[in-house]
Amino acid sequence: MQEIQKDIYKIEMVELLPVIMEKKNDMWRLVQICCAFVDGNYEITYSFATGYEISNYRLVVAKDEPVPSISRVYKSAILYENEMRELFGLDVEYIKVDYHDKLYRINEETPFLKKEEK
Amino acid sequence: MPKRSIVPFGPQHPVLPEPVHLDLVMEDEKVIEAIPSIGYVHRGLESLVQKKDFNEMVYVTERICGICSFMHGMGYCSAVEQIMDVQVPRRAEYLRTIWAEMSRLHSHLLWLGLLADAFGFEALFMQSWRLREKILDMFEISTGGRVIFSVNKIGGVLKDMPADMLSSFVSILNDMERDLRETTQIFMDDYTVKSRLVGVGILTEEDAIRRGAVGPMMRASGIEVDMRKTGYAAYNDLDFQIITSKDCDSFARCQVRIGEIFQSIELIRQAVAKIPDTEISVPVKGFPKGEAYVRFEQPRGEAFYYVRANGSKFLDRMRVRTPTFANLPALSQILQGCQYGDVPLLILTIDPCISCTER
């Protein structure tokens, strides 16, 4: 884990679930999950807060690399993960409630990716 | 095991001004599980960063919501100002605070009216909205708009409020406070209100955290967190206590919002008394490069803005996590175990804003 900016830590895939479990056990609230497509990779940022303290954990994955869902640990991740998959095409595996790309009922596939990125 | 059935609720329903759907798994009249479903009016505003430059995005963010329009603009500007290291003049921070608190007042009054309408107390509904109208008039006087104000810009605000306007607003609020005490007393004391709200839709402190609840929803579960205490805008100069309740039910959520109505009036009074006489904006040159996130307290709870810029006039990414989006999992939680007849009212107690959710 490496701090790349104040309160933003870069993590590797193997660190994701241990970090999530640690946050859950310490009663941190899931604030949001943000997906961005930068330089051919997905950047997924998980934000957790307790009181006014916030920590953001950033995972960078290749375009075709699957990401495990955290919705079985944090139920509130369901909407964020379905959103990331539908809007960006991120392969999130085993979401607890899977809307099958119909969370937003839009016809266009991965509308948040630019044409050249699809 | 009793027979289970799935009852669809919404997207069109008398208590829902905006479309949201729930699949309710029922055993007789009892709700066992509720699965929310959105996406009827998704606009994809975040992706407009590919087409609109970072200054134009102020106007896009203001159109995320018709109730907390001002605060969306403020949140976005704050994030870009953080990236560009812009020091906003203190008067602009105070003006932002005053408009933000006016937005909270009008949002909570709107919600009280909708709540009264939902349990059939029409006189209370009209009274709440009559009072709200005065806030909209104040918006119109100070910004020229009643819904979209377009007064935020990166580096400050576009319009000032002269001293006589500010003092007239304080006297309007002083008069309004008397009417508000009378109206909100009915919400607090009337048995018809209590019979629908007390002990209904329990969200424990632990569930509020586990489900990521924010705002009055979280504070009504005994959690003392209000983003205004982080001191953004002019809040670090203002004195206020966080309003919470430990009752965790629908009535507690009503209590917290009513408390915040009077708190907003007091905060506006304090801000008017302390507002410094400085410029209202600073010129901003160049393009943003870097990333920043801000959290701030909208009427419905904490909003999260993330902005990532590449040094050109178009941003790489803008992400908005609105309070209703965060409160939907908590809604599923409070619906579990409730009676079917309470479902419309419980949806209202999270103060849903689907416009925000479908940004």
Image: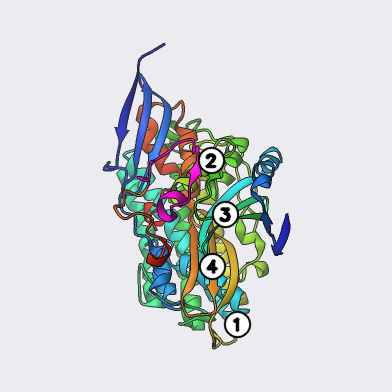
Indicate which disc residue B252 carries. Answer: 2
Q: Is residue B184 above or below residue B171?
A: above
Q: CA distance from mark 3 to mark 1?
A: 41 Å
Circle nearer the viewer, 2 or 1: 1
Q: Earlier in the sequence, mark 2 or mark 1?
A: 1
Report x, y in % for residue B262.
53, 57
In this view, A53 is above or below A22: below
Quadrant holding the C terminus of chain B:
bottom left
Q: Residue at x 49, y 34 (%)?
A: B333
> Depth-wise, is mark 3 or mark 1 nearer the camera?
3
Do discs 1 and 4 belong to a common subunit?
yes
Residue at which label 3 appears: A61
Q: Which residue is drawn at the image coordinates 59% and 64% (left, top)?
A: B293
- The 10 Å Cα crowd at callout 3, few under 14, some 14 to 19, many 20 or more, is some
The amino acid sitting under disc 4 is: Val
Residue B356: name its quadrant. Answer: bottom left
Q: Which mark is residue B89?
A: 1
Front residue of this view, candidates B303 and B98 = B303
